[in-house]
């Protein structure tokens, strides 16, 4: 889920060249779980086809007051359409449409819908630089702002006229971000901060070798995306991995060793609401790191190891108001070990995964978990994608406790 999941977005397209970018925006809305309906001015159809928009939005596209292809024309109910919407976005909004909206003109379906709309209205202006700068346009935009509408800024750069300046419609991703931000206060983790550790740690033996493990970081990254999609600011402290983050609300801190991970966590932990330790931190590191590559010899090589700091145990010990969740990766007696870790490390919940379960654990795209809360209530889940598992974990963390 994210800020746009289940939202009903009514998209009004007026006749400007930027309309060619709107199919991408429709696709992004759909990918983010929104429902989309499109109303367009007759002129907009010169720039982007209703067929493209209907295919992407999976809904019919309307541009006229009636459908006239039969002897019994249907009235396209602009009032119902306006009342259906959680938000009405007009993009691109041309100078003409902006002027009509500011003056309550009603000579096309888009404007009729606008005048009937009680939902929040977002306007993404698009026009040539001089049209945008004209005092008449600026006055109309000010009027729309005064009506309580969200007038989005314009971009600066190359314009269809060949001139360069201020007047470009925001890029689809930027419009998406504005709507996401608008709806995110409704999300379950809005206003909270979540710290997540992820991936392996590498503990150097010499300049070319290290002690590591098979952790890919995928579970921790899935948790980070889920938390951010639920409205949280996320700090992701991760050991070496090849993964990328998507949600801009994830701040990433790349580290290599357990000691570096600890230093980073120590700084961030006091100011977070939730901390989830998904990292597979090395429990031991070489006592002495050799400055030069160790040369091969005939005899066996012995490396003395010393324990690393237990980052999760540190967080448990210094817990104030944070909710602290750990992971337990076990190969035998999973329940017993997980419950023991939950108590010993002062946790509010622990996620148990067992390497014996096929598709669970390191490197896979799936996981099979049991979530144990602080009252030792255990809930087991089926094998799922790590994104779905992350959703299950947050549902457990956010579930009200007796
Ligand atoms: N953990 C940690 N710092 C460490 C070791 C572990 O923060 N130095 C965290 C892991 O991120 C995980 C939890 O502790 O959330 C349990 O890790 P696990 O390796 O299963 O257990 P250990 O405590 O290391 O115990 P053991 O290896 O004996 O099972």
Image (spheres, rainbow, N blue to C red):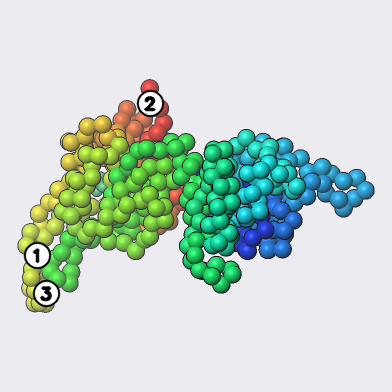
Residue at which label 2 appears: 401
Q: CA distance from mark 2 to mark 3?
A: 54 Å
x and y, in percent, of residue 4 in the image: 53, 44
Choose between 244 and 142: the one closer to the eye.
Answer: 142
* Marks 2,3: beta carbons within 8 A: no
Image point 70% across, 52% down: which residue? 40
Residue at which label 3 appears: 293
Choose between 26 and 402: the one closer to the eye.
Answer: 26
User: What is the count of numbered marks?
Assistant: 3
The local secondary structure at tag 1 comes to: loop
The local secondary structure at tag 2 comes to: loop
The local secondary structure at tag 3 comes to: loop
Left or right: 75, with 163 as reference point: right
Dividing the picture into quadrants, the one containing residue 42 is bottom right
Q: Is residue 332 visible?
A: no
Q: CA distance from mark 1 to mark 3?
A: 10 Å
Q: Does 281 appear above or below 113?
A: below
Q: Which mark is residue 289?
A: 1
């Amino acid at each position: 889920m994210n800020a746009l999941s289940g939202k009903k977005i009514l998209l009004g397209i007026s006749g400007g060249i930027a309309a060619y970018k709107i199919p991408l925006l429709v696709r992004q809305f759909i990918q983010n779980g929104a429902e989309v309906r499109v109303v367009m001015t007759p002129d907009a159809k010169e720039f982007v086809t209703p067929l493209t928009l209907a295919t992407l939005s999976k809904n019919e596209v309307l541009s006229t007051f009636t459908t006239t292809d039969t002897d019994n024309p249907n009235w396209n109910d602009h009032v119902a359409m306006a009342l259906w919407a959680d938000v009405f976005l007009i993009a691109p909004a041309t100078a003409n449409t902006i002027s009509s909206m500011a003056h309550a003109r009603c000579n096309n379906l888009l404007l009729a819908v606008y005048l009937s709309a009680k939902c929040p209205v977002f306007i993404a202006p698009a026009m040539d630089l001089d049209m945008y700068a004209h005092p008449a346009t600026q006055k109309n935009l000010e009027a729309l702002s005064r009506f309580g509408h969200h007038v989005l800024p314009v971009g600066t750069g190359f314009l269809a006229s060949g001139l360069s300046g201020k007047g470009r419609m925001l890029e689809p991703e930027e419009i998406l971000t504005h709507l996401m931000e608008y709806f995110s206060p409704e999300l379950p983790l809005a206003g909270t901060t979540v710290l997540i550790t992820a991936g392996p740690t590498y503990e150097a033996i010499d300049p070319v070798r290290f002690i590591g493990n098979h952790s890919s970081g995928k579970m921790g990254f899935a948790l980070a995306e889920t938390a951010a999609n639920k409205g949280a600011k996320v700090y992701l402290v991760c050991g070496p991995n090849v993964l990328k983050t998507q949600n801009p609300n994830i701040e990433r801190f790349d580290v290599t060793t357990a000691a570096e991970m600890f230093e980073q966590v120590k700084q961030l932990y006091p100011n977070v609401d939730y901390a989830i330790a998904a990292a597979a931190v090395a429990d031991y590191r070489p006592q002495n790191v050799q400055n030069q590559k160790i040369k091969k010899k005939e005899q066996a090589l012995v490396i003395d190891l010393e324990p690393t700091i237990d980052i999760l145990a540190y967080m448990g010990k210094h817990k104030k108001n944070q909710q602290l969740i750990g992971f337990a990766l076990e190969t035998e007696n999973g329940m017993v070990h997980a419950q023991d870790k939950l108590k010993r490390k002062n946790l509010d919940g622990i996620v148990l995964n067992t390497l014996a379960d096929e598709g669970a654990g390191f490197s896979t795209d799936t996981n099979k978990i049991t979530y144990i809360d602080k009252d030792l209530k255990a809930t087991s889940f089926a094998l799922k994608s790590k994104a779905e598992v992350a959703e299950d974990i947050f549902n457990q963390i956010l579930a009200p406790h007796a």
